[in-house]
Amino acid sequence: MKIFENIINHKISTITADELMKYAKQFQISINPEEAKQIAKYLKGKQINIFNDSERAKVIKEIAKVAGPSTAKEVNRLFIQFTM
């Protein structure tokens, strides 16, 4: 399972706004293109383990500052989908 986690965490750190929009649509998560751009910019290059609840919570708080609390909540739902 560690390899799976590493792949997902790497994808999170390299995700583009377009990819984020694609995943949001696939998982029926509501974010707009501008929010996706801001979130992708924030995540770029960050070494985040979204499988760790405290790390994920910290990232979601930062995303809330960048894109707003409702968007952060939606992104958290997306991250949870990735970890299942």
Image (cartoon, rainbow, N blue to C red):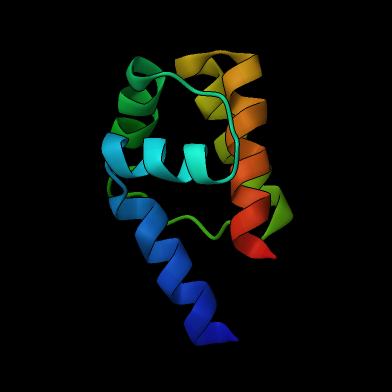
In this rendering, position of residue 61 left or right of residue 20: right
In the image, 21 versus 5, the foreground residue is 21
- What residue is rendered at 28% in x and 32% in y? 41
Q: Which residue is pictured at 54% across the width and 60% down the height?
A: 49
Q: Determine whether 3 is above or below 71 in the image.
A: below
Closer to us: 83 or 30: 30
Q: Residue at x 35, y 53 (%)?
A: 13
The quadrant in which the N terminus is found is bottom right
The residue lying toward the viewer, choosing from 52 and 37, is 37
Q: Position of residue 43 (x, y in %)?
A: 37, 41
Residue 54, given in percent of the width and then of the height, sits at 70, 49
The image shows residue 60, relative to residue 80, as above or below, that is above
Residue at horizontal 51 percent and vertical 79 percent from the top:
4
Asked if one can make out residue 51 in the rendered structure from this viewpoint, the answer is: no
Residue 28 appears left or right of 12: right
Q: Is residue 68 above or below residue 55?
A: above
Left or right, residue 73 beside residue 35: right
